[in-house]
Amino acid sequence: MKLKANNTTYILLAVVLGIWGVFVVSFVNDLNPGDSQVELSLGTVSTGKRQVQPKAVFELVDTPRDPFLNTNYTAQAKKTTTKTRVTNTAIVWPNIQYKGQIKSGSSKNTVFVLAINGLEHILKAGSTASEVKIVQGSNQQVRLQFKGQIKTFELQ
């Protein structure tokens, strides 16, 4: 009996050492992946490297519909604005001569004498005649506005 008990102990000891050997070899192979691979075969047990699956690569695709509202996106048309260019055409001023000013009492009652295209006009500051407006004036010069342009005319 003693002989049979020792035989089973030796057999079990060989199986345990074989299993521990498989674990040690797989651990060493995992630490040194560049080394040559050692394969042991004990029946149906083999120690090989596990196949590593590559990571999945995802790409974002532009979807033509809204997933929440279940409607299609519509491309918004770019608004194009056309800029109109204002060309400064030369404004032809009428023939203007500053003849002088007439004061009576305070400076509010001052009037200016202008000859516009040969016709004489007596105007206060701010008044208009033949599209010519008096902006301001003194006894030596007067500033006039015609179609948005301002010019200064000297006494003649």
Image (cartoon, rainbow, N blue to C red):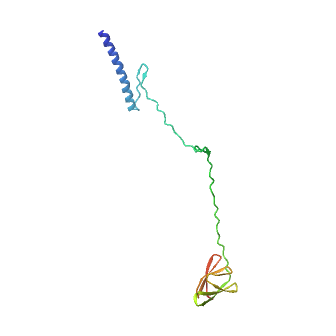
Residue lying furthest top: 1
Image spot of residue 132 (x, y percent): 66, 80
Which residue is rendered at x = 33% and y = 14% of the image?
8
Quadrant assignment for the C terminus = bottom right
Image spot of residue 150 (x, y percent): 61, 78
| Location of residue 93 with respect to 52 vertically, above or below | below
| Location of residue 84 with respect to 98 vertically, above or below | above
Image spot of residue 9 (x, y percent): 32, 15
Residue lying furthest right: 118
Relative to the observer, which residue lies in front, 89 or 66? 66
Which residue is rendered at x = 39% and y = 29% of the image?
29
| Location of residue 12 with respect to 146 vertically, above or below | above
Q: For residue 121, which quarter of the picture?
A: bottom right
Relative to the observer, which residue lies in front, 6 or 110? 110
Q: Is residue 8 left or right of residue 69?
A: left
Which residue is rendered at x = 64% and y = 80% of the image?
133
Q: Is residue 109 left or right of residue 21?
A: right
Image spot of residue 11 (x, y percent): 34, 16
Q: How many numbered circles are shown?
A: 0
Q: For residue 1, which quarter of the picture?
A: top left
Q: Is residue 108 left or right of residue 45?
A: right
Which residue is rendered at x = 35% and y = 24% of the image?
20
